[in-house]
Image (spheres, grey):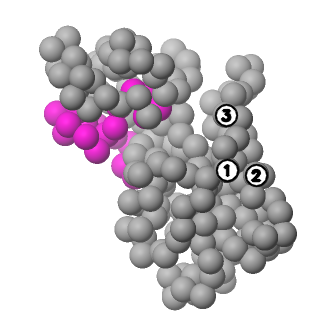
Amino acid sequence: MLQDKLKDISVILGSKSPRRKELLSAMDISFEVEVIETDESFDTTLDSVSIVKSIAENKLSAFDSEGYFDRLVICADTVVVDDKGSVLGKPANLAEAKSVISSLAGKPHTVYTAVAIAYRDVSLSFVEETTVWLNPLTVEEIDYYVERYKPLDKAGSYGIQEWIGRIGINKIVGSYENVIGLPTARLQQELKTIFK
C-alpha cells in the first residue's frame, strides 16, 4: 500500500498552507513542511489551468537541487475563477474580500488546484477542477464572515471549510478537498503511479 511505501521516504510539503498540511496529514502520510519563496505572478494571457499549473510547477522547481533528489516533494497552488472567467487570487484587504464574495454569491465558480510532485527522476503535475455554487448572501452575512474570519490568505476570498461554507454553499461538483486546497483522492492515485 502507498502509505506503507512512503514510511521510509522523506516527504516534503512545499506549502505553508495550514489547510494543505491538515489534508496531507489526513492521508496518513508523514512529512515535513519546507517552503522556498517563489514568484507567484503569472501571464494573464494564459488560461486558468495553465496559470495554476505553472505556479505549482514553479514552486516545485525551487526544490530542484541534489539535496532533494531522494525526497518526495509535493507543491500546490489554488485559483478561483468566477463565472466570467476572471482568475481570483488572494484578496489584498478586507474590502476586496467582501467585494469578491459579493461577486461570487448566487452564481457558480470554479476552483482549480494544481499539484506538482517530484521524486528522484520522476516529476509530474496535474490540475483538479471543482465547481461550486454559492447561495445569494446578504451584506450582513458577507461582512460577518470577512470581519470574523479575515480570509486574506485564501484564493477567492473564502474558505469552504469555514462558516461561509456551512451556510452558503448550495452545491459542489468535484472534490471538496480540492476547494480546500489539496485534492487528496487524486493525489493518492498519482502517487501510486510513482510508487508502484
Residue 38 in view of the camera: yes
Residue on which disc 1 sits: 36
Tell me how far mark 3 sits from mark 2, CA to CA.
12 Å
Residue on which disc 3 sits: 40
- Cβ atoms under marks 2 and 1 closer than 8 Å: yes
**Three-letter amino acid code of the residue under disc 3:** Glu
Tell me how far mark 2 sits from mark 1, CA to CA.
7 Å
Tell me how far mark 1 sits from mark 3, CA to CA.
12 Å
Magenta region, residue range: 154-178
Q: Is residue 138 on the magenta stretch?
A: no
Among numbered discs 2 and 1, the one appearing first in the sequence: 1
Q: Which mark is residue 62?
A: 2
State the residue at coordinates (26%, 32%): 149
State the residue at coordinates (37%, 68%): 26
**Three-letter amino acid code of the residue under disc 2:** Ala
Say which quarter of the image contains residue 21.
Answer: bottom left
State the residue at coordinates (47%, 48%): 17
With 31 as the anchor, is 21 left or right in this view? left
